[in-house]
Amino acid sequence: MQTEDSPRVKRYHRTRRVLGVAGFAVDFLLLVVLLATGWTISFRVWAEKTSTHAALALVVYLAILGLLSKGLSLPLDFVQGYWLEHRYGLSNQTISDWIMDQLKALALGGALAILGLEFLYWTLRRWPSHWWVVCALAFIGFFVLLANLAPVLILPIFFKFKPLQNPALTERLLSLCRRARTRVRGVFEWKLSEKSKKANAALVGLGNTRRIILADTLLAAFSDDEVEAVLAHELGHHVHRHIFQGMTVQGAATFLGFYLADLALRRLTPFFGFRGVSDFANLPLLALVMTALSLLLLPAVNVHSRRMERQADEYALRAIPERSAFISSMEKLGELNLAERQPHPWIELIFHSHPSLEKRLAFAQRFARSPQDPAPVASP
């Protein structure tokens, strides 16, 4: 059994990290330059010459910033999202399909950004003293709504889904959900192979949109026992209420981010020459605060995430009859997805939301030798 990462795996992940850090640096430096040079105020002036209506002027300003940002990030996006995946044999996507996905993401992201920022600056104009509380509550509510609607409105924009055409496996997975007291709307085959050679499965949605999605690459390479093991891990997140925990953490970070943004606006508005806290030329400052906060919180968030992943692994090992299927499924996922088995401890601490593959396998092997205990179930 392989216990160390091959040079190929190391190169792949090292390149991904370098490109990821480079992309972050480009975005961060753009925000700094916009503020330091006063370009953000110049863009606001141009936008207001186009329209005297605040909402329309903001749209023009966002279009200028969006085109500038995308133009700078596009080469790195191409190298990381297309070239690198093809270089290591992980992608099936054609260049035209990749471009189409980029255009879809740009249109969807742009529309959501316009709606969110129009609301933010409307709130800043209406409640300049308490805007951050109103916006934090509204954005948290929007995140919850988005999690509910993503399986039916967003994911189908990028992927094809159809009901799983395997009645025995479907019933087996639904039975697993019933034992976990988790209701789902169905089991769907996810046409991931049109874009990628990687394999995955997920339990997506909230409430009436929750459903099981299984990549066709997973179904082609995994036994029914292994598919059940992969899904049992996903169910573990629901049983242990990790979705709620994640939303709580995200909610707290959202409140903190808007609070710090409010402090920054009040203290730095005169320094940068903004007309007031509702001047949308201050958007790079707001983004800089949020970006810096995300960077500072990243290691702690990942520590919490790795703890939840370990709990989900433990649930899966208790919930399935064949614990060896969990181990073999992890091995196959690692091979298909070119996963790092033994990243450097500092790399794992900062960048990894999951325990390393070797740690997960070692835990599963120890667990497999222990007596079989029943898995916990979700609270009704």
Image (cartoon, helix red, strand yellow):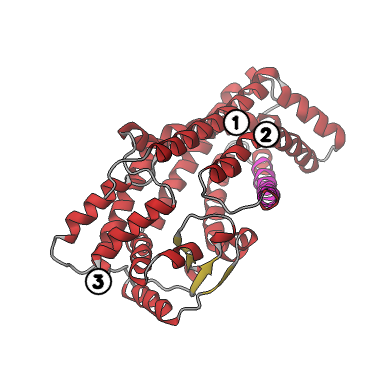
Q: Few, some or many C-alpha atoms within 10 Å of disc 1 (few <14, some 14-19, many ≥20)? A: some
Would you say the residues marked 1 and 2 are in contact, meaning their CB atoms lie under 8 Å apart?
yes
**x then y, percent, for residue 341:** 33, 44
Q: Residue placed at 80% from the left, 28% from the top?
A: 45
Question: Which secondary structure is most common in the magenta stretch?
Answer: helix
Which segment is the magenta one? 98-121
Label 2: which secondary element: helix
- Note whether 264 is above or below 8 in the view shown: above
Q: Quadrant of the C terminus?
A: bottom left
Residue 175 appears in view: yes
Label 3: which secondary element: loop
Q: Amino acid at mark 1?
A: Asp
Q: Nearer the viewer, mark 3 or mark 2?
A: 3
Q: Amino acid at mark 2?
A: Ser
**x then y, percent, for residue 255:** 48, 42
**x then y, percent, for residue 266:** 58, 26
Closer-to-camera residue (328/354) = 328
Quarter-wise, where is residue 23 in the image? top right
Residue 27 disc label:
1
Q: Residue placed at 50% from the left, 75% from the top?
A: 164
Q: Which residue is mark 2?
A: 69
